[in-house]
Amino acid sequence: MKFSYPIVNADIVAHRGASNVTPENTLASVRKTAEMGAKWIETDVRLTADLKLVMIHDETLDRTTNSSGTVLSKTLGEIQALDAGSWFHQDFAGEIAPDLEEYLDCVIECGLNLQLEVKEVPGLERELVERVAVVLREKWPTGKRPIYLSGFSERCLRYAAEIIPDIPRCIALVAAPQYPAALVKEIGCQMIHIQDIPYNTPARFGLLKSSGVEFAVATVDDPKRARELLDMGAQSILSDNPALL
């Protein structure tokens, strides 16, 4: 499968939506992202106890809802009965963690492009990718609006290459690899994400840039640093502030 590059045709990808001013991964955050002028949004999808798909970053509910315990220990219905907004601010009381279908409808309605990060549970990687693929085939206008899958799990990305090969894939890493082109070929993906940490020196960025592999950096909320990273070859920056630049 051949893809057009750059896959991300914008400097900024809104990290979990407009997560600096709204509760992350909610529909309110999607709408605010569009309002702030961003073109791309990033979100996280997880499996619930009944193997449904919910938009939550953490393995647990403690940080972003009024409950506790793991996402995998509760059904989608149980999770959507929780308050996923008050933790951020009382103005968002009653916001829920949307399921993937609801989230995609909102993203499409708002005219955004999507980075969908699959949050694996070891042992359930195939189930996750298969269920995501079913929803994307039903909802997303693949080929007409940009989208790509990302994740830290090489297994998830290999399943995605098999099940939905027409959607680009990105491996999420902490450190810049020594041989970027060999790594993406080995995994079967098209992009690399790395973290903005001291280990990733200008020399490491130079390796990425010279490899020709598209790469992005997360998570950057300082505009000066974002411009430095773009100048060092990053095609895009993940930021909690959609209007960073």
Image: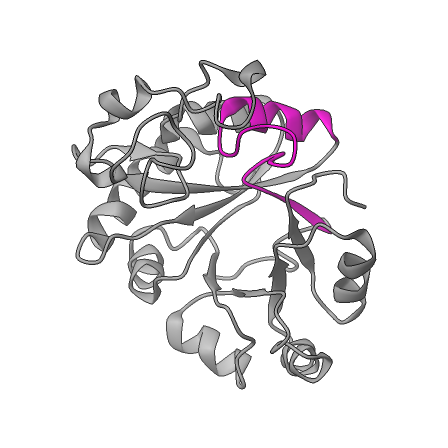
Give whichever of 201, 101 is nearer the camera.
201
Look at the image and say whether residue 127 sits in the magenta stretch: no
**Magenta span covers which residues?**
11-36
Residue visible at 52% across and 80% down? 177
Q: How is the image coloured?
A: one colour
Is 217 rendered above or below residue 27?
below
Look at the image and say whether residue 26 sits in the magenta stretch: yes
Total marks shown come to 0
Residue visible at 45% across and 27% down? 103
Indicate the position of residue 214 as horizontal and vertical percent values: 62, 66
Give whichever of 35, 146 is nearer the camera.
35
In the image, taking residue 229 as reference, residue 139 lies left or right, namely left
In the image, taking residue 146 as reference, residue 61 lies left or right, namely left
Indicate the position of residue 183 as horizontal and vertical percent values: 46, 78
Give whichever of 164, 152 is nearer the camera.
152
Indicate the position of residue 142 as horizontal and vertical percent values: 48, 40
**Rendering quarter of residue 130:** top left
Residue visible at 75% across and 32% down? 37
Q: Quadrant of the N terminus?
A: bottom left
Indicate the position of residue 118 as horizontal and vertical percent values: 37, 49
In the image, taking residue 240 as reference, residue 189 lies left or right, namely left
Give whichever of 66, 119 is nearer the camera.
66
Is 9 rendered above or below residue 212?
above
Residue visible at 64% across and 36% down? 20
In the image, taking residue 228 as reference, residue 141 lies left or right, namely left
Is 137 rendered above or below residue 190?
above
**Rendering quarter of residue 34:** top right
